Image: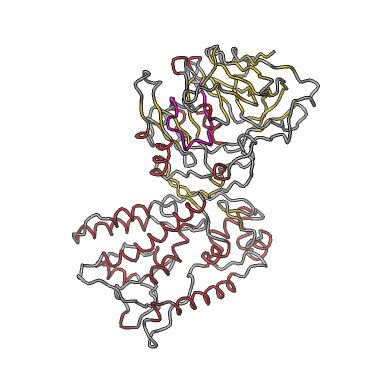
Amino acid sequence: MMKERNNGKNRLVAAVLALLMVLEMVIAMPATGTKAEAAVLNPRFTTVAEMQGKLGTADKTWNAAYLTQIELYYWSFADDAHLGTNELTIEIVKNVYRNLEQLLDNGYVMDYHVLAAYAAQYLNTRAANGLGADEFYNILNMALDNPYLLNKPVATVTATTYNGRDYSRVFDATYYAAHNPDVAAILGNNPAELLRHFVENGMNEGRRGNEAFDVNAYAAQLDAQVLAEMKASSVYQSLGAAAQPPVGKYSYSLANYYSKFLGFYDGAITTVTNGNKILTGVYTETNPLSVYTGLPVDPVLANQRPIAVMMPTDKTAQPSFGISRAEVLYEIMEEGNISRQMAIIQNWKDMTKIGNIRSCRLYYLYAAKEWDPILIHFGGVFNMHGVVDGEDMNNLSGTYEYGTGGAAPGAGKFYRTSDRKAPHNAYISAEGIISASKSLGYQLGLRNGYYNPRHFSFAAGVNDLSQYPEAKTANVIDLSQVFSYTKSALTYNAAEGVYYKTLHGVAQKDGLNGQQLTFTNVIVQNTKWTYLSPTGSYLYFQMLDNTEDGYYFTKGKCIHIHWIKNSDYEVTRYFDDYGNEIQLNPGKTYIAVAQKGKNVLFQ
């Protein structure tokens, strides 16, 4: 359902933008007091001269490239007497829309700063004609909130996919290189770069991608279908026998035919806090088991993007509200010898109170990225700059997002209570998260290209670690040397098969329901660390590494492990001493990121 809603939103934006581009030509003209309702045919494209005439300017610096490159303005259904008039019909808009669908497609390449400049001129013309800033102003701004208009991101490309869309039905790298020696001379035998060239240039240049698909034959078939639909339309039929034949063409961009054949890219517009815009696909999770817990999950919930909430361990800040919902809970040391927690929560949309919420640190961002959540935090520190405000991150912050600067996305949705003193009284609700995310353009469904459909490796049955002769008994996990202030600890309950967590020597509970936190799996991840400067107090943890070790605890047992994470969105994987990925038991997981050199005790 989320995928369909996002796809519908993109179609709406494209349709609105298409309509507006046609309406601009009418609105920019001096008002005549007449309402155009008749159909119009113009079998040729609008020229720069015609556009300048309609705009009432001979400005030679005005560039109509955005019209001519996608051949936007061609009229449907009329005779020569109507050529050049401003009369509109839904059929015109439909034709415009077909071409503009490519705006939201993942293969479009164009400099749309030209369009932004023209939009400004359009709005100025409205004002000059006394039309004011009405709904067209708002709709146009919404339409322009599109990554392919300004600041188009660099596409993510593999040997067969471009921004998540599979091109293997129309593209073969070996075929493309062999039949396009000029391209191969530059790119060599690099499948990903050959695909990039095909999508960004080759399709519209008429270059064939493989032996199987002939785009020209497909285009002829589709055009014939479009022509038949146009002739059968009520608008055309109303013109009578003397009407000229309509322009029966699906598009003047070959890329559009490829898009039609493959299925339009199911994208979602995401606006990040620094003003840049990116396009990411909507991932549909079909696994009946949760990627977080390995337990059965409702399909609707499975496709819901999680939140990552920064929560304190300070004694005076307990209890936290909503923390028991965390499928995965991280605890890492911060400055002042006090740890902090990051709760990864997938099932959050019914939560009325989440928090209290504290600031973030750089190393949490690398842990968060592998889950692709919406990060919920109350500020941060200076070295988060360039990461928390990057194009890939979506965050809501109650204050400046990296402490000394940045934006405060969604700050108006945070609130403080009177039962505690600041900074331990900042909260947010699910309603606030949803509202802020919508206003910022954050995607609430899983993002293709960022979401990891496989994270932990879960056991098919019960893993009691009996396959490891070296496994140690671990009924009590003592982290007092790792987190000396909180003295975090976990005690195994054999009857329930879970570890109960304590903080400051007492049960760590959720303020929403009074439940003590329990975990099926406990991971201690030893990590290189340092201070940011010789006299600095801020810590830095090396979250990307392949040389460090740790421990895995489950069912009252423990084994030694190694962990690997090589890139931001790559998952952290955990291996036993034999090189096998460890099999977690289905359930919640607690991860203590420990400073290397500090010991975990267990008995």
Vertical placement of residue 322 versus 450, above or below: above
Q: To which quarter of the image does residue 427 belong?
A: top left
Q: Position of residue 355 (x, y in %)?
A: 44, 26
Q: Please name the residue shown 52% across and 58% down the image.
A: 107
Q: To which quarter of the image does residue 291 belong?
A: top right
Count of numbered labels shown in the rendering: 0
Q: Nearer the viewer, residue 518 or 200?
A: 518
Colouring convention used in this rendered image of the protein: secondary structure
- The answer to whether residue 380 is magenta is no
Q: Range of the magenta residues?
A: 340-356
**In-image side of 127 versus 91 (left or right):** left
Residue 407 shows in this picture? no
Vertical placement of residue 531 versus 160, above or below: above
**In-image side of 587 versus 133 (left or right):** right
Q: Position of residue 243 (x, y in %)?
A: 38, 85
Residue 120 shows in this picture? yes
Q: To which quarter of the image does residue 568 belong?
A: top right
Vertical placement of residue 12 versus 586, above or below: below
Q: Position of residue 58 (x, y in %)?
A: 26, 67
Instruction: State the quadrant of the C terminus.
Output: top right
Q: Please name the residue shown 34% across and 34% down the image.
A: 412
Q: Position of residue 57 (x, y in %)?
A: 25, 66
Q: Nearer the viewer, residue 443 or 466?
A: 466
Q: Nearer the viewer, residue 580 or 566?
A: 580
